[in-house]
Amino acid sequence: MWGLPRGRKSPSGFSPSSTAEEVTAGIDGSGLVAIVTGASSGIGAETCRVLALRGVHVVMGVRNLSTASQVREKIVGQVPTAKIEILELDLSSMSSVRRFVDNFDVLDLPLNILVNNAGIAFVPFKLSEDGIELHFATNHLGHFLLTDLLLEKINVTAKESGIEGRIVIVASDSYKHSYREGIRFDKINDESGYNSILAYGQSKLANILHSNELSSHLKEQDAKVVVNSLHPGAVVTNIARYWGFLNGLLSSLGKFVLKGVEQVAGVTGSYFVDCNTVQLKSHATDKELAKRLWDFSMSLLR
């Protein structure tokens, strides 16, 4: 796993081998509501379990309702008091994102936490139903729209409850391996020159730029909502490596989603690895690039 050697404590007090349960120990999340995308398997499912364990009312955003139901049953078997809703969500489809938000509104719940976790990686060239390259549509644009549509509710919840709202965007150190120009604005849907590794890197760079720009907007509005991006760990290729990856991500999620201590409260617009702030490469901190991506994303959604 990238970052600290397993077991070595970082400035945050946690290491890559720290589990989500360790990081969130003693925390009472009762009364909080969280949406987790990509929640029917892997890190998304485990994130839901740990949040439910701490008393958070969880809404699973998933493509596969049947698999999600099995995940919910398993969590409820371990945490009988768990409050878990399941709503269909395909991040590659903008109409699906809008339906998800409409269905969430019907639940008449507040929203304290949004975890943008879902994603795809290294797929052959393909356009979404909206005509957008699939990595960019799923990993960035779908979450961009989802966040935009939910932002008012997160803002209102934070203001009325007095509890800081939190948005966590799961990015990746693969942002370092994007196309030469960073974001191919003029060739976003162009098959010529397409490379699945670079396309994935481009979408992860977009995640970070989105987080940074959104953080700036929220600061200007003096909103009581923070947004951060994080690198979860090495790419998973087998179950043995999976657990280190999972714990690394969930340690970060546990810290930034639930912790309210001084070292976390108010932290926004940052990028984290193993619960610690990491310096980004220059193209990921380019404010002009972030603003251009924001405007470009908005134009695609009109």
Image (tube, rainbow, N blue to C red):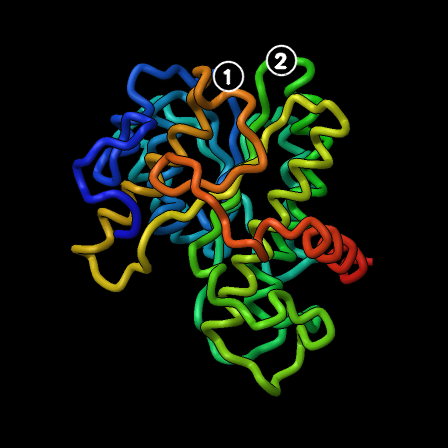
* Label 2 environment density (alpha carbons within 10 Å; few <14, some 14–19, many ≥20): few
Disc with the residue nearer the chain's start (2 vs 1): 1
Q: Residue furthest front?
A: 282
Residue 166 got which mark? none
**Residue 77 visible somewhere in the drawing:** no
Instruction: Tell which of 229 and 51 is nearer to you.
Output: 229
Instruction: Tell which of 100 and 246 is nearer to you.
Output: 246
Q: Position of residue 206 (x, y in %)?
A: 60, 56
Count up the numbered dots: 2
Check the picture and name the quadrant holding the C terminus. Answer: bottom right
Determine whether the residue tagged by mark 2 lies in a helix, strand or loop.
helix
Q: Amino acid at mark 1?
A: Gly
* Quarter of image, res 114: top right
Q: Amino acid at mark 2?
A: Ser
Q: Position of residue 136 (x, y in %)?
A: 60, 64
Left or right of 155, for residue 23: left
Q: Residue at x 52, y 44 (%)?
A: 169
**Residue 76 visible somewhere in the drawing:** yes
Left or right of 57, for residue 143: right
Residue 161 got which mark? 2
Determine whether the residue tagged by mark 1 lies in a helix, strand or loop.
loop
Q: Residue at x 42, y 55 (%)?
A: 173
Q: Residue at x 50, y 64 (%)?
A: 201
Q: CA distance from mark 2 to mark 1?
A: 10 Å
Left or right of 71, for residue 19: left
Left or right of 285, for residue 262: left
Is there CB contact under 8 Å for labels 2 and 1? yes
- Reading the image, the residue beneath label 1 is 31
Instruction: Tell which of 37 and 108 is nearer to you.
Output: 37
